[in-house]
Image (cartoon, rainbow, N blue to C red):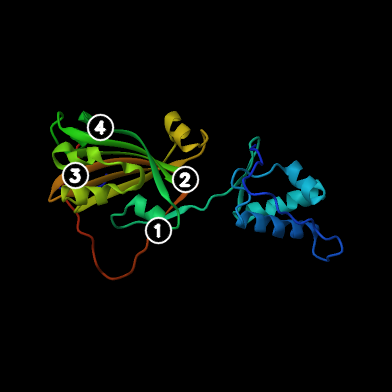
Amino acid sequence: MMPPPPARSSTSSTPPTFCKPDRTNPLPLWAQVLGDVRGRLARGEFVDGFPPERELIDQYAVSRHTMREAMRRLHAEGLIDRERGRGTFVRHQGIEQRTGALYSLFRSIEDQGFVQHSVVLELDERAAPSVARQLGLPVATPFVYLHRLRNADDTPIATDELWMPSRLAAPLLAVDFAHTAVYAELERRCGIRPGAGWERVHPTLPTRDERALLGTSARQPAFLVERFTSHVGQPLEWRRTVIRGDMYTFLATWSDTGEQRERSAFTPTTAS
C-alpha cells in the first residue's frame, strides 16, 4: 500500500553589437542604454558572462550614474542578478512545474524549450537499508540506484537520486540516462509504470557536494523534493531531488468542483 506524505569574464562567442546613445535624442541616456542592453540580452550576446560595469561604461561612453540606473532597471525587470563582491549575472529563464499529478522532470524541461541532459554520476545495484525501511521492505532488499546531475541546456538545475527494487527495475542498469526519462525506460524495458504516489517539497540548503554540482553558493536555497511511487500496491520508487531555487517554480491549480482526493491510511516507517 502507498505511504501518505509525511565577477565573471565578459568573453562571449557572439561579438558585441552595442549602439552608443544619441545625445541629441530627448530620451534619457540611461533609457537608451537600457533598451540597447535589453536587445543584446535577447540576442544571447552574454551567454558566457555579463560584462563588468567599467566595460559597459567604456562601451557606451556614459557616466557611472547613468550606467547604474540602466542596470538597476534591468535588475527590477528580472533580467539580471547582482551580487555584492561577485558581479552581475544574466538571470536564466526558470522551469515552471505544475503539481498535483505525476510528472517527469525530463518532460517538463523539454516541453518548455530546453534540452534536458543528465550526467550519470552513479548507476549500480546496491543495498540501501534506510530506504528499505522507509518503504517497509526487508533491509537486505537490493535496489537499482541512479544518481544524476540534471541540466537544462548547459545549466545545472538538479541533482537526482532514486532507488527502485531490483526485482522490478533490473533492466534499467543497461540504460544510458544521458537523455531519456526513467519512467519511459521503465515502461519500455520492464512493462511497469507508477500507479500512485506522493511528493513532498520543502526548502533546503544543499550540501557542499550538491553545491559543487549545481554551481550555487553556500547561502543559495534550493528545493528538496522527496517522491514515493508504487505499482499495483507495492513500493516502486524512492527519490530524492535537490532543485535550484532560482531556476524552478512549482505551480498549483485548483477548482471548486466538490471532488475530494482519495487518501491512504498506510503510515510510512521512519528511516533511522
Q: Quadrant of residue 10?
A: top right
Secondary structure type for disc 3: strand
Callout 4 amino acid = Asp
Callout 2 amino acid = Gly
Give the foreground label among 2 and 3. 3
Residue 37 versus residue 85 in the image, above or below: below
Q: CA distance from mark 4 to mark 2?
A: 29 Å
| Numbered tag placed on residue 159 in the rendering | none
Looking at this view, is 16 or 231 the one in front? 16
Q: Position of residue 152 (x, y in %)?
A: 45, 48
Earlier along the polypeptide chain: callout 4 or callout 1?
A: 1
Q: Position of residue 174 (x, y in %)?
A: 24, 39
Secondary structure type for disc 2: loop
Q: Which residue is mark 4?
A: 124
Q: Callout 3: few (<14), some (14-19), or many (20+) C-alpha neighbours within 10 Å?
A: many
Give the foreground label among 1 and 3. 1
Q: Which residue is mark 2?
A: 245
Q: Which residue is mark 3?
A: 236
Earlier along the polypeptide chain: callout 2 or callout 3?
A: 3
